[in-house]
């Protein structure tokens, strides 16, 4: 199993729940997706009542784009009343922000993602990624057949109490650029994949990830492939490749960004 390096809480002024939400652990020295998923399952047992979220690729960029994504009017929350009378140079400012504002923002994201008015129909996403070319589709397949992370990569782990695995997206709503799937579109994809027996494990700056559960049924594979073809312009050869990989693997990786080939620096 990959080593799990836990980050010890240094600041006694920050609540443990907030620390775990911000940065519970790093998974390091990863050799394979199988090893990463083994760590994920072990962490689930370790925290039990809470849910485990992995930042799957480019943690710094994912944090940056998420910071902008949550300025979407459906996700934005104003902290001014909580911080109004505190000098930003006063240590109390950071303490209040971490212990009051961070939990408030997380709960707001949970509520907004759950709100019926904000639910996106999966089929309404059709067409947004129709600009994907052959290299983008090859990248999508590549994500599911090769380890995308080097052995010196550290996977950030966040932990929080939330009702469903899908709502873990509230830990890091993402989809900032206009050509990306936005946070609510990503949530629709996450929920649709749950229907096929895939548990959402997290996302990064470009990718969404799932682990296969006991609810996965091979006989539904054709329906799943057709759903993937709704949101990506998969031709018959790429549908065939994805079908084989989904049946073989215990995970699923999908891009939500404009041009997944750029993530791999493709030169095809």
Image (tube, grey):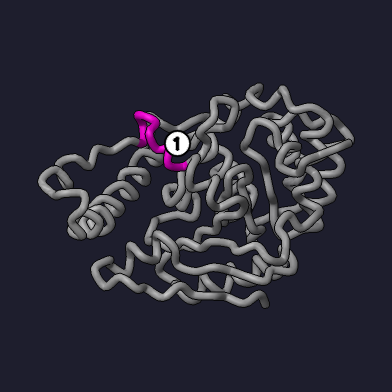
Give the x, y percent position of residue 144.
Answer: 76, 51
Residue name at image x 36 percent, y 31 percent: 74
Depicted 260 relative to depicted 92: above or below: above
Give the x, y percent position of residue 238.
Answer: 84, 37
Does dot 1 land on a helix, a strand or a loop? helix
**Quadrant for the C terminus in the image:** top right
- Which secondary structure type mostly characterizes the magenta part of the structure? loop
Depicted 74 relative to depicted 155: above or below: above
**Quadrant for the N terminus in the image:** bottom right
Residue name at image x 43 percent, y 36 percent: 68
Asked if residue 72 is among those painted magenta in the image, a careful observer would answer yes
The image quadrant of residue 27 is: bottom right
Q: Which residue is mark 1?
A: 69
Task: Residue at the far left: name it.
Answer: 85
Given residues 157 and 236, the one toward you in this image is 157
Give the x, y percent position of residue 82.
Answer: 16, 47
Query: What residue span does the magenta drawing correspond to?
Result: 66-75
Depicted 74 relative to depicted 169: above or below: above
Give the x, y percent position of residue 97.
Answer: 25, 53
Asked if residue 71 is among those painted magenta in the image, a careful observer would answer yes
Task: Residue at the far front: name it.
Answer: 89
- Direction from residue 1 to residue 100 in the image, left or right: left
How many discs mark residues in the rendered view?
Answer: 1
């Amino acid at each position: 199993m990959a080593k799990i390096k836990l980050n010890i809480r240094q600041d006694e002024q920050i609540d443990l729940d907030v620390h775990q939400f911000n940065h519970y652990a790093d998974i390091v020295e990863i050799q394979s997706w199988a090893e990463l998923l083994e760590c994920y399952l072990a962490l689930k047992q370790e925290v039990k009542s809470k849910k485990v979220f992995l930042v799957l690729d480019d943690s710094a960029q994912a944090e940056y784009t998420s910071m902008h994504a949550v300025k979407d009017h459906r996700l934005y929350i104003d902290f001014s009343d909580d911080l109004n009378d505190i000098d930003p140079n006063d240590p109390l400012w950071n303490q209040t922000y971490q212990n009051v504002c961070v939990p408030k923002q997380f709960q707001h994201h949970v509520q907004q993602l759950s709100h019926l008015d904000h639910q996106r129909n999966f089929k309404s996403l059709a067409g947004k990624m129709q600009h994907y070319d052959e290299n983008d589709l090859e990248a999508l397949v590549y994500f599911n057949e090769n380890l995308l992370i080097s052995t010196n990569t550290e996977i950030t782990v966040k932990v929080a109490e939330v009702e469903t695995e899908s709502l873990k997206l509230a830990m890091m709503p993402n989809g900032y650029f206009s050509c990306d799937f936005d946070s609510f579109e990503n949530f629709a994809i996450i929920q649709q994949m749950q229907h096929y027996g895939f548990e959402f494990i997290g996302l990064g700056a470009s990718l969404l990830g799932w682990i296969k559960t006991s609810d996965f049924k091979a006989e539904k594979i054709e329906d799943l492939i057709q759903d993937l073809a709704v949101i990506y312009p998969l031709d018959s050869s790429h549908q065939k490749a994805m079908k084989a990989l989904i049946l073989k693997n215990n995970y699923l990786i999908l891009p939500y960004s404009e041009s997944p080939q750029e993530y791999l620096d493709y030169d095809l």
